[in-house]
Amino acid sequence: MNLGIFYGAAGTVLSGDDLVADVQAATDAGFGSYWVPHLPWGADALTSLAIAGREVPDIELGTAVVPTWPRHPLTLAQQALTTAALIGDRLALGIGLAHKPVVEGMWGIPFDKPIRHAREYLEILAPSLRNEQISYSGETLTGRGTAIMTGVPAPKLYVAALGPQMLKLSARYADGTILWMTGKETVRNHTVPVMREAAEAAGRPRPRIIAGIPILCTDDVQAGRELAAEQFEVYGTLPSYRAMLDREGLEGPADFAAIGSEDEVAEKLQALADAGVDDIICSEFGPDPARTRACLSALV
C-alpha cells in the first residue's frame, strides 16, 4: 500500500515555511508523496511545490489539482516545467476541470462542453510538457510553439476524472487519474476497467490510479463522522462527486471517510488498495492530527 499526504481538503492551507516543515515531516516518516490542492484562495500550488522541493529532497510532489479553465495549457506547461527544472523529475502535475459554480461564479468563464475542453487542453498540454513542438487548432483552444525548456524532465501528468469520458481521456493522454469521494466498489467495477481498457486501446502504459480520502484516527467515531459531514459537506452537493457517492451507495462524505481506530483506518485503506488503487493520498482532519499521522506512518 503506497501512502502519500494530501493536505488542504479539510480546510487547512499551508504555505511557505509551514508547508516545507510538513513536507519534511512526511518525508522523514517515510511517505512516498505529498500533494497540495490549488484552491481559489491561498498560495499557488506549483510555486509552493517549487519552494518545498528546493528544501526537501527525495519525495514525490504533486498538485491535486490545478484547474484548467483559468490558464492556457501552454502557460501551465511553462510553469510546470519551471517547477520541474527546480526540483527534478519528482513533479506530478495533477489537473482538473473544477466545478461549474467556481468556473462560472468566480472566474466568469462558461462551463461549456467540459469534455471537449478537457480533450483539447490535453492535446496541447501533454506534448508541451514533453518539450515537443506543437501546432494544434481545436474548436476552443489553439496551441502553437516549440520546446519550452529543453532538457527539463517532463512532469508526470494526472487528470482528476470520475465519469467514463474523463477516465478515458486520462488513460489516453495522461499517466493516470486522481480520484476523490470514490469508494472501493466504484474503483473496482468502474474506474479500473474503464481506464485499463482505454489505455490498452490507445497503446498506452497501465494508468496509475491515485485516490484521495479523508482520514481521522479516533476512538469517538460518531463525533468524527459529524465533523467529516460538516467539513466535507460541499463534496456531497457537487454533481460529479455526488454521482460517485451514489454509485457507491453512500449517503455522504462522512460515509466515505476513513474514521475510527488504527485497525479500522488500516482496513479501509487496504480495501481501496485491494480494489485497484495504486496510491492513496491521505487528507488528515480532526482535533488529533498527531494520532492520525502516527497511524498512517505505521502503515507506511
Image: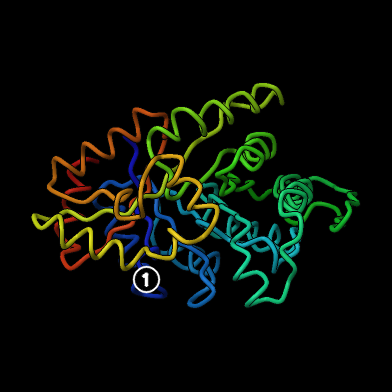
Q: Answer whether residue 251 is visible to the viewer in this image.
A: yes
The crowding category of the residue bearing disc 1, from other C-alpha atoms within 10 Å (few below 14, some 14 to 19, many at least 20), is few
For mark 1, what is the residue?
A: 11
Q: Tell whether 141 sits left or right of 195.
A: right
Q: Quadrant of residue 235?
A: bottom left
User: Which residue lies at the image location 17% right of the left edge and 68% below the top edge?
Assistant: 287
Q: Answer whether residue 150 is visible to the viewer in this image.
A: no
User: Which residue lies at the image location 34% right of the left edge and 53% below the top edge?
Assistant: 5
User: Which residue lies at the image location 47% right of the left edge and 28% below the top edge?
Assistant: 189
User: Which residue lies at the image location 68% right of the left edge and 39% below the top edge?
Assistant: 169
Report x, y in % for residue 123. Answer: 78, 46
Considering only vertical position in the picture, is 165 above or below 188?
A: below
Q: Which of 191/61 is in front?
A: 191
Q: Which of 116/171 is in front?
A: 116
Report x, y in % for residue 69. Answer: 70, 64
Quadrant where the image shows the C terminus: top left
Callout 1 amino acid: Gly
Report x, y in % for residue 281. Answer: 37, 48
Q: How many marks?
A: 1
Report x, y in % for residue 120. Answer: 79, 50
